[in-house]
Image (cartoon, rainbow, N blue to C red):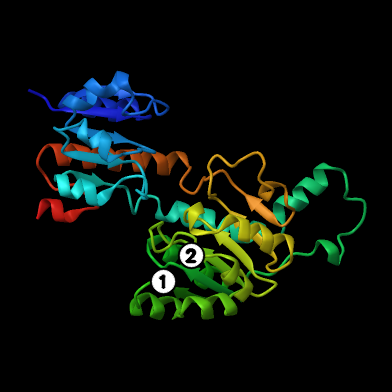
Amino acid sequence: MKKRLIVQGQLSDAQLATLEHLFEITQLSKAMSLDAPDNRHYLAEAHGIIGSGLAITPELLDAAPKLEAISTISVGYDNIPVDELTRRGIMLCNTPDVLTETTADTGFTLIMATARRVVELAEWIKADQWQASVGPALYGSDVHGKTLGMVGFGRIGQAVARRGALGFGMKVLYSNASPKPAIEQQLGATRRELDELLAESDFVCVTVPLTAETERLIGAQQFALMKRTAIFINIARGKVVDESALINALENGVIKAAGLDVFEQEPLSASSPLPHMPNVVALPHIGSATHETREAMAQRAVDNIRLALQGEPPISLVNEEVNQ
């Protein structure tokens, strides 16, 4: 008898065909709650779940006694209780690596767009305000040769730093990571304590995962340490930053500008001032949102769940102790 798999969200026809050949599939829309009463009978028989934006709770797991593996189409898994899964012997798989370069592209796009005031000036032209040569009031900031401070130095942080160091001759500092001598040698990067990095950097780019330790890692105290000319970039998670402190810092000239792909509340509240501020470039969490990367992420998730339910080691297993 085939194992049963819940698919929440969108997979390609070819990916669904692969899974349907191996498993009994129940497909739910992304908008449907996994633990809604109408879906409880699916959970009761499910051996696996694959999808994006999965919200997993202990109560949901109680309703899924046969569950062996969850495959999230994302790198982050802050909505999933990893310790609880591990305790129950359930594998959690994610999709690192395949989105590293694309997300780093987004991070550096925010650096460039914010420094050179690209969005603001494009709107200025659309409003027919270009009547004479641009003067100092509309000048931006150089990126080349400046100091890039990476708060977090995992795959994505290193990829952003590589663009800065090798492409723009930037001096790279990094914090919130163990020493990385190989990448230090490659990029001329230097490890700093967080406070030192904030004080020295022209651009501060956050790429740490959201954990209990990193929630609101950057707040009023940290913004006060930055240069008044500093530009702040967040491509990590919105809750890593105290958003009210960020708004205050931008409104009062504590820092110069911000480029943001993530927010405390997503979608962004209509009452938020951030997208309306001239010194902010705000994007709708598009770090990995290209056709090629989203396809690769979905394929990695499909491969993970296929291997896990067939008794083979998944490619990207978060809680490796389950298989030990």
CB atoms of marks 2 and 1 within 8 Å:
yes
Q: Quadrant of residue 31?
A: top left
Q: Position of residue 213 (x, y in %)?
A: 39, 64
**Could you say which is closer to the camera, residue 293 or residue 277?**
277
Left or right: 122 as drawn, with respect to 86: right
Disc 2/disc 1 C-alpha distance (Å):
10 Å
Q: Position of residue 261 (x, y in %)?
A: 55, 50
**Circle 1 sits in a helix, a strand or a loop, which is it?**
loop
**Nearer-N-terminus badge (2/1):** 1
Q: Position of residue 294 (x, y in %)?
A: 41, 40
Residue type highlighted by circle 1: Asn
* Farthest left residue in view: 1
Mark 2 surroundings within 10 Å by alpha-carbon count, few (fewer than 14), some (14 through 19), many (20 or more):
many
Left or right: 85 as drawn, with respect to 28: left
Q: Is residue 140 above or below residue 285?
A: below
According to the picture, the residue beneath numbered tag 1 turns out to be 176
Q: How many marks?
A: 2
The quadrant the N terminus occupies is top left
Q: Position of residue 13 (x, y in %)?
A: 33, 25
Q: Is residue 167 above or below residue 96?
A: below
